Image: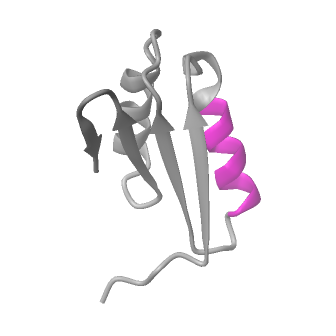
Amino acid sequence: MITQPDISVVVPVYNSEAILNELVERIAKVLSNTNYEIILVDDGSKDNSWASITELKIAHPTTVSYTHLTLPTIYSV
């Protein structure tokens, strides 16, 4: 049975490639004793934020999920 997280941290992402890895690591450290999830929402970044987000999902498959908002299509995983 899949358990729901106790805490969901929703992070809006726009041109944030440079800070995403550190941000996720800091959140993970603070919430390490909690059942949590991190939802990264890319809102059409022009840098490589989307690539960083997908790499973070691979590195943290049970805690990181993401959504990529673009007009007119919305992708989510």
1 and 74: which one is in front?
74
Magenta stretch holds residue 26: yes
Vertical side of 16 occupied by 55: above or below: below
x then y, percent, for residue 21: 58, 31
Vertical side of 54 occupied by 9: above or below: below
Coloration mode: one colour
Locate residue 25 relative to residue 43 in the image: left or right.
Answer: right
Say which quarter of the image contains residue 51: top left
59 and 7: which one is in front?
7
Q: Residue at x 26, y 41 (%)?
A: 75
26 and 37: which one is in front?
37
In this view, the residue farthest toward the top is 47
Locate residue 58 relative to residue 15 in the image: left or right.
Answer: left
x then y, percent, for residue 30: 76, 57
Q: Residue at x 50, y 51 (%)?
A: 39
Magenta stretch holds residue 63: no
Say which quarter of the image contains residue 9: bottom right
In this view, the residue farthest toward the front is 72
Q: Residue at x 69, y 72 (%)?
A: 33
Span colored in magenta: 21-31
x then y, percent, for residue 37: 53, 62
58 and 14: which one is in front?
14
Mostly what secondary structure, the magenta segment?
helix
Q: Residue at x 34, y 42 (%)?
A: 58
x then y, percent, for residue 12: 58, 38
Assign the N terminus to one quadrant of the image: bottom left
